[in-house]
Image: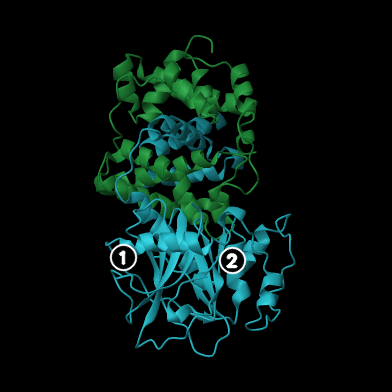
Amino acid sequence: MSGNDRWTELEELMLRRSTFGLSPEEMERLEALLAAAPEEDREWIERLIGELDAELAIREEEDLALPAGLRESLLAAAGEAERAIGREGALGPDAYRRRSAGPAEEAPVAPAETPVPEGDPDQVAHVVPIRRRTALEWAGWAAAAAIAVIWLGTSAGPESGPTVEVIPGTDPMERLLAVADVPDAMRIEWTATEDPTARNVSGEIVWSDLVQRGFMRFRGLEANAPDEFQYQLWIFDSERDERFPVDGGVFDIPAGEEEVIVPIDARLPVRGATFFAVTVEAPGGVVVSDRSRVAVVAQGAE
Amino acid sequence: MQDGRTISLGEWRTRRSRVKTHDPGSTPLERVAQGEPGAMVACVDAYTSLVWSLARRWFGQGEDAEDAVQEVFVELWKSAGRFDPTRASDRGFVAMIARRRFIDRRRKFDRRVETESMPTGFDIGTSEHERIEGRVMAAPALAALDTLPEDRREFVMLSVVYGMSHQEVSDKTGAPLGTVKSGIRRGLMAMRDVLTQQGMEEVGR
């Protein structure tokens, strides 16, 4: 077989692979031919067809309606996969540092092994460059309360969620870094209500729609006995009916901690977080909140 | 445009100058490959419509297509590290992975690959070009397709895009089987040459 014949056979097999698929025997033959082919030529037909497919799809995508729930289920699966990967350490602050080795590192970042004084907010604020977004900052009580009243006045309940892990501020930098470096990260200070649990509360919520992660930081929120009541976070999403906020998880505030950081574990994708509320609920949390006790709220983008 | 359908290379060069530039590492695929948190979610956001539109072509509506879409994304997580923006666009790479999965899926379940029957009026007419242009997106492969003689362009579309066998293309067009085979091969090679000439790698820059 001449080189030209071999080349012709290779291209025909590549084309068939991209159109009809190959039998095991044909695949074996293709692999043998590819092994002898220049690296740069190995996938050119598939790449070319891929480009054609992608460009032709443009006209279909504009008018295309996705099946109900498809995007949401894919997003949820992706988010879950990322959380699983994150727990295993493959995704985390180191990944962010590698990525943000350029101009994004506008503030000093302590090495991972640098101990961060527990409960030292100044230290945390110093080493973690959270990007403030003026449009999302510090909503006034009046606005927050107004939204809270609207929410409290609605009758439908949210979906229930998990009990989330509480991490007393022992390693706040890691989690802060992981979310704060995301381009769309929002940071909003809590606004306390008149609920007795929140008389001296301060802190903030940091959330990113992009990575579907965030955390809450509390100082002064009353410690709870989990068998008496628990706190529950609700996330209002501009792309969802406001009667159905996303459950951000049930959590506890341990006694004796100056500062508590609680990771958010939204069970549903949040596309445009606009408002956050922490309620006081029966142990285990609720599926449908009666909204009788709201501890703190945070107003995001309008 | 020359005749309402064909776009000259010069026009494509002009058009491509308007295409947004690519920051290295900025596509969701590259971010997945870098292990960046949020990248998988961004991938779903960016490519679901594309993958779904391709899946519909292969499997129609229904659960089979939805399952195929999920398989494609699983494969994307695994394959993202192989994406090379100097050789392909991110959407082209996604479409390539999707096509592989669809073919595998079809062969696995019924051993017979049949893409959706060719719709009538499949030519890329003026209005379609305008729509694509309106998106200010690069469509260099389509432009390269447009540079082919009409018969070869038809062979490529029927075989590659609509999955017809060489014999079916021959039957449909009336061209001899050998002409169809050589026309497809030469058509693809000519498209590659056009893309190479224009600097296909620029798509990713």
Reading the image, the residue beneath label 1 is A159
B189 vs A90: above or below: above
> Mark 2 is on which residue type?
Ala
Q: Position of residue A92 (x, y in %)?
A: 58, 67
List the single residue furthest toward the bottom. A256
Task: Describe the element under mark 2 as helix, strand or loop.
Answer: helix
Front-lying residue, B98 or B66: B66
Local packing at callout 2 (Cα closer than 10 Å; few below 14, some 14-19, many 20+) is many
Chain A pictured colour:
cyan
Local packing at callout 1 (Cα closer than 10 Å; few below 14, some 14-19, many 20+) is some
| Numbered marks: total | 2
Front-lying residue, A73 or B85: A73
Q: Position of residue A197 (x, y in %)?
A: 45, 81
Q: Is residue A111 left or right of residue B39?
A: right
Reading the image, the residue beneath label 2 is A178
Calculate the distance from the C-alpha at mark 2 to the C-alpha at mark 1: 27 Å
Task: Describe the element under mark 1 as helix, strand or loop.
Answer: loop
Q: Is residue A47 left or right of residue B118?
A: right
